[in-house]
Image: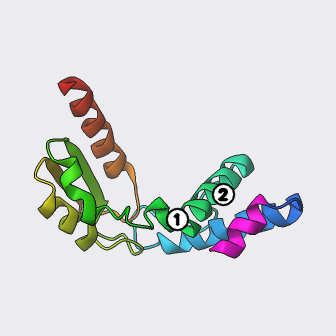
């Protein structure tokens, strides 16, 4: 992860583009259990592909910014009373559904929505996200 993050942020832009394409291929394969998956490039636009790869590798190479006592489960009481939606695809290989389920069990004001026929995103997940945002905006 750290090696990709360094390559993507490095001065050699040709190498950064190669790293972004390699990352894209991995992401495309990694989500292949999703019934909407199509072989090939996940993100066609080169700039979007680079941005996505930079963000993901930076996020993960920094422990999702949850290191040093900032773990969500240990601090779940801080979300007491805050409404939230956990939207997760049952077929998500990189993040098993047990993770949001455990969070949901400890977060009384959360709502867990499991999209049975999707993996790491997809049209049903996006629809659920849109509804969740509208519900939260409507309650503000």
**What residue sits right under mark 2 in the picture?**
54
The quarter of the image holding the N terminus is: bottom right
* In-image side of 75 versus 109 (left or right): right
Q: Position of residue 103 (x, y in %)?
A: 21, 63
| Whole-number angstrom distance, CA of label 1 to CA of label 2 | 23 Å
**What residue sits right under mark 1 in the picture?**
38
Residue 120 picture quarter: bottom left
The quarter of the image holding the C terminus is: top left
Q: Which residues are magenta?
A: 1-9
126 in relation to 100, above or below: above
> Majority secondary structure of the magenta segment?
helix
Q: Nearer the viewer, residue 58 or 13?
A: 58
Disc assigned to residue 100: none
Is any atom of residue 69 visible in this view? yes
Is any atom of residue 21 visible in this view? no
**Marks 1, 2: nearer the viewer:** 2
Q: Position of residue 116 (x, y in %)?
A: 24, 64
Residue 131 picture quarter: top left
């Amino acid at each position: 992860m750290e090696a990709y993050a360094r390559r993507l942020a490095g001065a050699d832009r040709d190498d950064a583009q190669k790293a972004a394409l390699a990352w894209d291929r991995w992401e495309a394969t990694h989500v292949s259990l999703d019934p909407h998956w199509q072989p090939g490039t996940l993100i066609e636009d080169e700039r979007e592909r680079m941005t996505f790869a930079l963000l993901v590798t930076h996020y993960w190479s920094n422990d999702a910014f949850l290191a040093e006592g900032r773990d969500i489960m240990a601090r779940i009481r801080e979300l007491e009373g805050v409404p939230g939606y956990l939207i997760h695809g049952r077929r998500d290989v990189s993040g098993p559904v047990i993770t949001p389920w455990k969070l949901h069990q400890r977060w009384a004001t959360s709502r867990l929505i499991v999209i049975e026929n999707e993996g790491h995103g997809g049209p049903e997940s996006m629809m659920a996200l849109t509804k969740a945002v509208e519900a939260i905006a409507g309650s503000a």
